[in-house]
Image (spheres, rainbow, N blue to C red):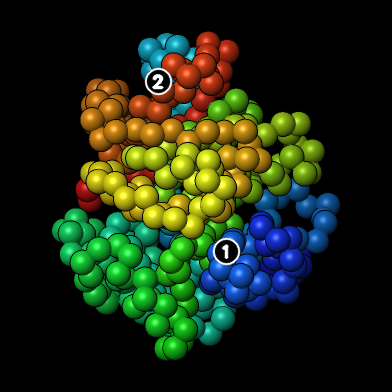
Amino acid sequence: MQMNPRLSGLRCIRCDSLWPPADYPEGCPSCLEAGHPASLECRYEPSADPSMPLPVLDPVTLGEGATPCLAAPALAQAEGVGELWLKCESANPTGSHKDRMAAQLVSRARLAGASRVAAASSGNAGVSLAAYCAAARLEADIAITRDCPPLQREAMQRFGAKLRAFEDSLSRWPYIADLCRNHGAFAGTNYLNPPVGTHAYGVEGYKPIAEELFDACGVPTDIVVPVARGDLFWGIFLGWQHLLQIGRIDRLPRMHAVEPYARLSRARAAGDARKNWEGVTDQYSIAGSTCTLQSLEVLSRSGGSPVEVSDAAAAQAQQRLERGGFATELSSAAALAAVSRLRRAGLVDAESSVVLLLTSDGRRG
């Protein structure tokens, strides 16, 4: 396990400043000082090697990645689109896409000499980080909310994580900030408010999804992704961006962000992602009142749209997927419900090739 020698630095997505390879859990230092938290994007030296570059080579692994991408012609016909594909991220070791990020992030933590990882999560991220920390022989401190689903809580504890409960999502972040800033913990999630994306090296772990999709179904016209603070959304986009840069594709797919109530649309209208937009939802994996600049950046660069999906619409989509043999958590099923909204808005049609990211099967929901 080692850092990729091609990693040359990190670029701020807001101010374009360049930073040397290092750990920046709070994103761009300059933008943070200016009060505009902004993610950093890894930069690599050019190479004849066409493989997808990642920060950590030979990382700690539990067998993440290479998840199925399945055609769903009956759903495509029902939705009035040309093709519909399901990217089944529940096939990852702990049952969600988070394993891809955890492999890179936990590996970097070990290379950096950290003895523990601290994170705020009441769901899939906490379970994944706990599992990968166990594999890497690191401690995991997870701040959960008091309404954390019992099966999620139990899974984290079985992997040896130390849990501390808080009343709500935002109240966890000062605790994690203190562990990371003052007690040597490596940041496994965001802890700022306004938030920034998770550690750039971890988010890079999502890039291979783009290549897996390309190998399975070419370049789709549209990709629909459930989004909270946009780590998965941004990471997949970075993968497509790499494929474009090396000439394997000649266009980017549009990427659409699914959310349970308006955050991104309001942030985009305001030109500012730093506010809080409260809402109530059972889609716990994409809940919360905040969004990030990195999500707005994906929408802008790809020409995609935010799509609001109610709990009721997500539940109907969940039942439709189950009738086809696909178990999903409510947040994942919302991606299917979003296709109908995109169709009605004229953003997809009978010529469209659409991929849905099914982020988790909800086995612990």
**Is residue 337 or residue 344 the one in the foreground?**
344
- Residue drawn at point x = 72 percent, y = 71 percent: 19
Q: In this rendering, would 283 be left or right of 55?
A: left
Q: Tell me which amino acid carries mark 2.
A: Ser
Question: What residue is shown with label 2?
Answer: 340
Q: Residue 259 placed where, x, y %? A: 39, 40
Q: Residue 72 placed where, x, y %? A: 42, 21
Question: Along the polypeptide, which appears first: circle 2 or circle 1?
Answer: 1
- Residue 36's disc is 1
Residue 40 visible (yes or no): yes
Q: Secondary structure at mark 1?
A: loop
Residue 106, placed above or below residue 333: below
Q: In this rendering, would 280 be left or right of 197?
A: left
**Is residue 172 or residue 76 the one in the foreground?**
172
- Residue drawn at point x = 25 percent, y = 46 percent: 280
- Residue drawn at point x = 67 percent, y = 34 percent: 252
Q: Secondary structure at mark 2?
A: helix
